[in-house]
């Protein structure tokens, strides 16, 4: 059953087309992730579905009396309410009922005879299980890292306010939940909780997030926005990547065929310029249509390989660094000598002091104790979380030219500022656009462009994954992989940390601990530490024989055939899903069957490895 349908939607923004007659539907219980390059209209699409923005053309159809809750990406609301008061300031029916009950109690305390009304309302609250609503609110706030419920909202940072409104949004039951970048400003522990909370919910979900692990776990469909069109893929983020690769392969084949036809048509046009018959005019029109199609088939790619300045023998040395704020020690007696090959990921809870460490390294903050030694050849490129220091009236091209007119690439070629903007997916026609007209993600992309234009040999990245689309993140990861310099990054994006880091600095109970490897390596080592620290269980008696039993030998002989059969079934289901394309309701049982088969294949492989290991021992 469909909750919402969009039909023939057209939307233009600042003179450019975001959506060109797009159609899609959201089914009950469906969980859709929206992906696309920053500036393609992801947030606008969410607002249109939520009824907060009107399309220029087309219809948004809501089926029945369905409730929708929406979480914006930005909250700049000034409020002198406390956190708990702000969360309860909503039009949610349950919360309004509790407020009405409290007002009724006040009237009874003043002597009014309202016994029957009071009993009736108490009965309603009983049936809707709302007596512990405030406790539920505080539980959600606590899970989101908010515990000082009496603090004023206008005293909070932007990220803290986002968590307050996320709690308010999650509190209210609805048919469709719309979330714009819900994982921004959340640490990994909080993201894990939100992931489980949304998976347990039966409501439909439409969300934008850069967190690819989150997308992979949560979504049942992916909606990609590309050049004014939307493409719907059934399955999670991993399956979307597989289907997208197939679609792009098909598109390349189609493009090759179109180019061959175009060459023949161009030859005919040049030889028949004066043609006037109806049949010939139709052929000319077909040629013009082909020409237009080929324009849209060319793909922009965000790629960059800068030449970083050489690093001398001395890099960055932190010697017994200590830093405290307001009696709270963030960094205590920390020492480390940065290696030339280091790509360091800094992790920890919000407020632990991660940004403080980066600012100390950059020389923007002085430590209370200890010293920082910076090599003479070191040149920092510092990418911050804040974009509010960008002059909103400055044009994009001028913002880059303030740094340099051209940059040098690793192959020796030079690249002017305008071409660099194009590499960062800013269309040539937009280069003179004032910064104030850019989306949040576009501003961040422009800021990164400016930072890299300086060709630094040390990149300091403070939450680089916030507000970036998944495509930009993939390119940033590829760039870091080939970057001939030092990278020190703060991030809660587990996928990003896995791809780029070879060391993890983890804030743990006021101490920065160093782990070799990426994020998965860090998790494995943390698990080992946990097992060592807990009380050891009584060892199990050692069995005398490690040989395979008769039944295990028989199982091992046939297990490869079982795995092959399961994988063949899985391939058949994948083919069926591709045929259904975007029909979620028809595909849902197949997707559930696919999930079970994938688990069976995984279990069989684990069993296979166990039996082989036992056989070898």
Image (tube, rainbow, N blue to C red):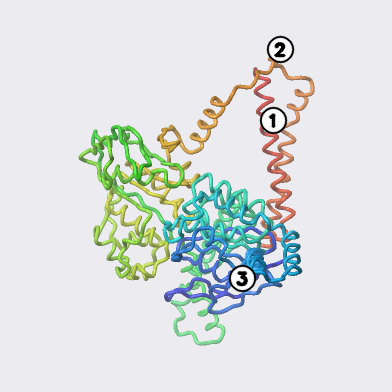
Is residue 187 placed above or below 166 in the rendered structure?
above
Marks 1 and 3 sit apart, C-alpha to C-alpha, by 45 Å
Q: Is mark 1 on a helix, strand or loop?
A: helix
Residue 69's image quarter? bottom right
Left or right for 136, reference 117: left
Is residue 327 placed above or below 383 in the rendered structure?
above
Instruction: Tell me what residue is drawn at x 57 percent, y 60 percent.
Output: 168
Left or right for 481, reference 369: right
How far across and down, in percent of the image, does residue 362 sit?
A: 28, 45
Left or right for 375, reference 611: left
Q: What element carries label 2?
A: loop
- Of residue 255 and residue 280, the one placed in the foreground of this image is 255
> Which numbered circle lies on residue 607?
1
How far across and down, in percent of the image, does residue 378 sit?
A: 24, 42
**Sequence-first tag of 2 and 1:** 2
Instruction: Tell me what residue is drawn at x 71 percent, y 38 percent.
Output: 564
Residue 181 visible in this rendered orientation of the protein: yes
Q: What element carries label 3?
A: strand
- Of residue 493 and residue 575, the one placed in the foreground of this image is 493
Residue 25 visible in this rendered orientation of the protein: no
* Crowding at mark 2 (Cα within 10 Å: few <14, some 14-19, many 20+): few
* Crowding at mark 1 (Cα within 10 Å: few <14, some 14-19, many 20+): some
Give the total of numbered labels. 3
Report which residue position mark 2 lands on: 544
> Which numbered circle lies on residue 256?
none
Marks 2 and 3 sit apart, C-alpha to C-alpha, by 66 Å
């Amino acid at each position: 059953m469909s909750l919402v349908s969009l039909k023939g939607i057209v939307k233009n923004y600042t003179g450019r087309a975001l959506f060109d007659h797009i159609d899609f539907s959201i089914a009950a219980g469906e969980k859709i992730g929206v992906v696309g390059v920053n500036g393609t209209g992801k947030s606008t699409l969410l607002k249109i579905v939520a009824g907060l923005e009107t399309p220029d053309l087309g219809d948004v159809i809501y089926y029945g009396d369905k409730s929708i809750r929406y979480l914006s990406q930005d909250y700049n609301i000034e409020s002198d309410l406390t956190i708990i008061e702000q969360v309860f300031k909503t039009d949610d029916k349950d919360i309004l009922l509790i407020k009405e009950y409290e007002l009724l109690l006040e009237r009874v305390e003043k002597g009014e005879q309202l016994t029957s009304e009071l009993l009736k309302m108490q009965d309603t609250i009983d049936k809707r299980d709302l007596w512990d609503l405030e406790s539920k609110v505080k539980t959600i706030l606590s899970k989101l890292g908010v515990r000082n419920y009496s603090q004023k909202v206008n005293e909070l940072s932007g990220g803290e306010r986002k968590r307050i409104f996320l709690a308010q949004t999650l509190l209210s039951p609805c048919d469709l939940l719309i979330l714009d970048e819900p994982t921004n400003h959340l640490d990994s522990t909080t993201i894990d909780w939100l992931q489980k909370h949304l998976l347990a919910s039966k409501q439909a979900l439409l969300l934008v997030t850069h967190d690819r692990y989150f997308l992979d776990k949560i979504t049942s469909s992916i909606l990609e926005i590309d050049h004014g069109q939307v493409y719907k893929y059934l399955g999670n983020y991993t399956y979307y990547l597989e289907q997208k690769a197939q679609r792009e392969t098909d598109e390349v084949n189609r493009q090759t065929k179109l180019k061959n036809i175009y060459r023949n048509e161009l030859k005919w046009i040049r030889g028949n310029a004066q043609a006037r018959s109806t049949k010939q005019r139709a052929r000319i029109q077909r040629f013009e249509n082909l020409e237009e199609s080929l324009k849209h088939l060319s793909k922009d790619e965000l790629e960059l390989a800068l030449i970083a300045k050489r690093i001398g023998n001395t890099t960055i040395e932190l010697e017994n660094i200590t830093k405290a704020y307001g009696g709270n020690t963030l960094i205590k007696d920390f020492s480390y000598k940065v290696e030339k090959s280091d790509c360091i990921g800094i992790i920890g809870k919000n407020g632990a002091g991660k940004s403080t460490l980066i600012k100390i390294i950059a020389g923007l903050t002085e430590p209370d104790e200890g010293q920082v030694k910076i090599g003479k050849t070191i040149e920092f490129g510092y990418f911050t979380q804040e974009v509010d220091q960008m002059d909103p009236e400055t044009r994009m091209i001028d913002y880059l030219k303030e740094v340099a007119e051209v940059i040098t690439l690793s192959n020796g070629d030079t690249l002017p500022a305008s071409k660099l903007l194009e590499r960062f997916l800013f269309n040539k026609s937009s280069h003179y656009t004032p910064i104030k007209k850019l989306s949040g993600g576009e501003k961040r992309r422009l800021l990164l462009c400016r930072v890299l234009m300086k060709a630094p040999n040390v990149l300091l990245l403070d939450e680089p994954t916030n507000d970036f689309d998944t495509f930009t993140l993939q390119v940033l990861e590829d760039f870091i992989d080939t970057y001939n310099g030092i990278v020190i990054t703060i991030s809660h994006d587990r996928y990003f940390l896995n791809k780029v880091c070879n060391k993890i600095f983890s804030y743990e109970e006021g101490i920065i601990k160093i782990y070799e490897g990426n994020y998965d390596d860090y998790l494995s080592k943390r698990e080992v530490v946990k097992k060592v620290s807990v009380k050891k269980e009584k060892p199990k008696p050692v069995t005398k024989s490690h040989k395979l039993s008769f039944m295990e030998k028989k199982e091992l002989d046939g297990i490869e055939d079982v795995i092959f059969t399961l994988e063949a079934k899985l391939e058949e289901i994948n083919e069926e899903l591709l045929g259904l394309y975007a029909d979620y309701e028809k595909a849902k049982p197949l997707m559930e069957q696919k999930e079970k088969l994938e688990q069976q294949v995984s279990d069989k492989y684990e069993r296979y490895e166990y039996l082989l290991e036992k056989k070898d021992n």
